[in-house]
Amino acid sequence: MKEKIIREVSKFNNELKLQGFKAFQIEDDGAETRTYSRKEFYKICLTTGKSKIHYSDKTYEQEGTILFFGNPHIPYSWETISTTYVGYTILFSEEFFKNSERSESLQQSSFFKIGGTPVLKITEEQRTFLNTIFQKMISEQESDYVFKDELIRNYISLIIHESLKMEPSENFEQNKNASSRLSSVFLELLERQFPIETTSNPLQLRTAQHYAKHLNVHINYLNRAVKEVTGKSTTTHITERIITEAKALLQHTDWSISEIAYALGFDYPTYFNNFFKKVTGTNPTAFRSAQV
């Protein structure tokens, strides 16, 4: 069996930090595994081949042509299974895209959210069309055109909008009133607490009261708005997100149960064990063992 190669995804970090964008073609890329961690940029990949994508606490095994959407706030790794794997990748910073003043599609897209699906199956007709867009971005980044950044942002928007059209419209929620706006801000703040990448920087906001204080609103107002818009309580959202992160850490790190407990803001491992078992029906040790 061929030994897998470990390689970081963000190999263009220095250049990206200066320019905020990079597009490149994926060559024959078989038998490689990209490490499970938070990346510094949004990522969109158009790839053809067979792969296994570990995204947060879920795993997606895909074959054929797919679009993958990576979020800098959600850890993932990518295992290439087929010996031939080709396609295109773009990496871009939030700041780069927001300069277009048309970033609502990025914020509304379920592809980049923790509860959404980051993988979209692509037909041959769609692949042909998207190939052209990726090729144009690769070509444009090397050009001397003075407005090339704006043009590239338009190409990114086009890819996102084409993807949104492939998804049911009910997956996307518009901010129509104050409750929706507050709920959206809360969910964004919740997501920005993750992923947990080090035990030395534990989770700070763990309760609905913490979030209400941080957002400078009364706890009852926050709870009412979140419940009205999402159908779930503030505490339920927080609990589900902590459990998602706990599962990801148990699956993809070698941290001890105690280290994971402290990283997630629990004062004692026993508190974490009780919390995890109450929500999932099993304890952290058993869950980790079942993933092997």
Image (cartoon, rainbow, N blue to C red):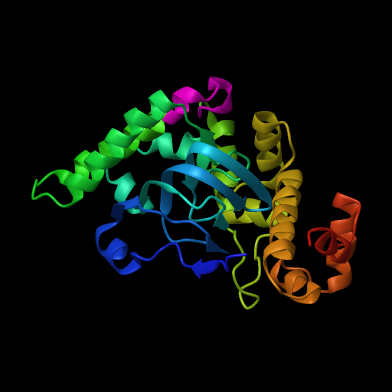
Residue 7 left/right relative to 22: right
The answer to whether 280 is drawn above or below residue 164 in the figure is below
**Image quarter in which the N terminus is found:** bottom right
State whether residue 216 appears in this view.
no
The answer to whether 173 is drawn above or below residue 243 in the figure is above
- Residue 245 % position (x, y): 69, 57
Judge whether residue 151 is colored magenta: no
Q: How many marks?
A: 0
State whether residue 134 appears in this view.
yes
Judge whether residue 168 is colored magenta: yes
Taking the spot 52% from the left edge, 34% from the top edge, the residue there is 120
Residue 111 left/right relative to 126: right
126 or 213: nearer the eye? Answer: 126
- Residue 42 % position (x, y): 42, 51
Residue 115 left/right relative to 242: left
- Residue 65 % position (x, y): 48, 36
Residue 194 left/right relative to 176: right
- Residue 274 % position (x, y): 90, 62
Give the image quarter of residue 119.
top right
**Image quarter in which the C terminus is found:** bottom right
Taking the spot 39% from the left edge, 31% from the top edge, the residue there is 127
Which residue extends farthest bottom? 200
| Span highlighted in magenta in the image | 163-175
Taking the spot 44% from the left edge, 56% from the top edge, the residue there is 29
265 or 243: nearer the eye? Answer: 243
Give the image quarter of residue 165.
top left
Give the image quarter of residue 253.
bottom right
Which residue extends farthest front? 1
